[in-house]
Image (spheres, helix red, strand yellow):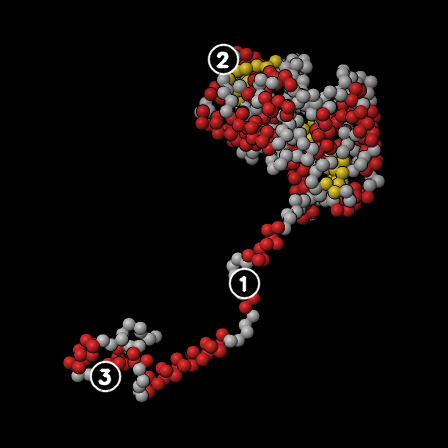
Amino acid sequence: MLSHSGIPTPETLSSNKKHNKPPELLSLKSNSLNSVLLPSNHPRTCLLLAILSLQVILLLTLRSLPFPRHHFAPPFDAAASVPIAIEKTDQCCSGRVFVYDLPGALNREILASCDNLNPWSSRCDALSNQGFGQRATALSGLVPENLVPAWYWTDQFVSEVIFHNRIMNHKCRVMEPESATAFYIPFYVGLAVGKYLWSNTSTAKDRDHHCEVMLKWLHDQPYYQRSNGWDHFMTMGRITWDFRRSKDKDWGSSCIYLPGMRNITRLLIERNPWDYFDIGVPYPTGFHPRSDSDVVEWQSFVRNRNRTTLFSFAGATRGAIRNDFRGLLLSHCRNESDACRVVNCAGSRCSNGTSAILEGFLDSDFCLQPRGDSFTRRSIFDCMVAGSIPVFFWKRTAYFQYEWFLPSQPGSYSVYIDRNAVKNGTASVRQVLEKYSKEEVSKMREKVIEFIPKFLYAEPQEGLETVKDAFDIAIDGVFRRFKEQEEWGFKW
């Protein structure tokens, strides 16, 4: 490589003369640019000039050749990115649902006969307003005024109606069954069987009738025959045990055990944890937000609520149950009245919620959640929607029920107390809860508040703008399950 820093000066030439060295040796030794630029007959100089000339000629020749430059695209091609930027994303890549048009006797006519759906009173009010029930105007003054219209006295057994209304307007509903990956059966089985559960004159045949009619109709559908029900799902608006009668004299319907039901995915407010096809979904509560902003405002409201009570309990004793644990908790709570608030729900006082329940949960850090008539109870979700931290005594009350909707770490949002320790007096509910610091309580409450949207069923039939509610989570989960079944060949 030639140096560009050795051009001789008068001083260096004078110095060279003093050492009596030939000029040509000096020019070669100095390796200067001058030795190249100035004419010389030295053979090495000629060789260098020849090499430089060849390089110049080669460079000019290469630049004149038509190389295919388009093969070397820049790292970011602005022109090429334009179609990607405007390309519409497929919002239904996870799945598409076809909704069966069932005979009216299996849904519409059941709803129309709301006066006769239970032996005590009409259910028409409870099933009004798309299944949300009557508006809860009595909550004015307790909740933010602009959110009062989003509150209803919602019945706990109306999920069939809510899911049907929502799925008819789902963005991924298709009208052609051949393009569907999931098939929804809008059967109001819970409303149908509820008519007979407390009737002294009903028979096993009465309780099974509607389900048998539905299955007979379904067996004739080609897409059911194709999959044997593996890509079909439905909502059953009661607890799973209401549909698992083994003997004619026992409680409930035998719908789940009837031929043809085995492979159908079932959305229930309480599932059998050992049945793959049962999926637990949240009980409907009274809050049905109209927009994303309703959700955010409610979360802020419960986060900033001044809570004056350590814990609360809303419930009633069950005299017919031996060693009734709820009665024990009620007694414990009354004895700790300076730390616990009791909402007495004896009889039908708390049917479909009351302002006293909501106020009790809003004012409490923790809410006691023993099992109800079954392992779960609607109060779990009323409690968490109010930003209160649930205290469980049975793991099956929540942890084994609602995996799609609750945090994966139970201790991050709830407290578990061994009921047997409470029964034998070795554990005090109050003492356990008082051990949590303010920072720990705040962190747990924040986790509850974060998950509130997953416990709600929004009012708009097309859903909220960006927030996913319980319905969205459930449908996404069903799509994911059916997709995994196909990819993994997970069928038997």
Q: CA distance from mark 1 to mark 3?
A: 53 Å
Q: Are marks 3 and 2 in contact (CB under 8 Å)?
A: no
Identify the residue at horizontal 72%, vertical 36% (top origin).
169
In the rendered structure, the answer to whether residue 80 lies left or right of residue 275 reads left
Would you place residue 237 above or below residue 25 in this image? above
Q: CA distance from mark 3 to mark 2?
A: 110 Å
Whole-percent x and y of residue 355?
A: 61, 17
Residue picked out by circle 1: 73
In the rendered structure, the answer to whether residue 408 lies left or right of residue 98 reads left
Residue 135 appears in view: yes
In the rendered structure, the answer to whether residue 290 lies left or right of residue 229 reads left
The quarter of the image holding the C terminus is: top right
Query: Which residue lies most toward the left here?
Result: 18
Identify the residue at horizontal 68%, vertical 41% (top origin).
479
Q: Quadrant of residue 144?
A: top right
Dot 1 crowding, Cα within 10 Å, few <14, some 14–19, many 20+: few
Which comes sooner in the sequence, label 1 or label 3?
A: 3
Q: Report helix, strand or loop for mark 1.
A: loop
Labelled disc at residue 398: none
Which comes sooner in the sequence, label 1 or label 2?
A: 1
Residue picked out by circle 2: 338
Whole-percent x and y of residue 457?
A: 65, 30
Dot 3 crowding, Cα within 10 Å, few <14, some 14–19, many 20+: few
Residue picked out by circle 3: 23
Q: Are marks 1 and 2 in contact (CB under 8 Å)?
A: no
The quarter of the image holding the N terminus is: bottom left
Identify the residue at horizontal 26%, vertical 81% (top origin).
27
Q: CA distance from mark 1 to mark 2?
A: 74 Å
Residue 276 appears in view: no
Q: Quadrant of residue 282?
A: top right
Q: Quadrant of residue 94?
A: top right
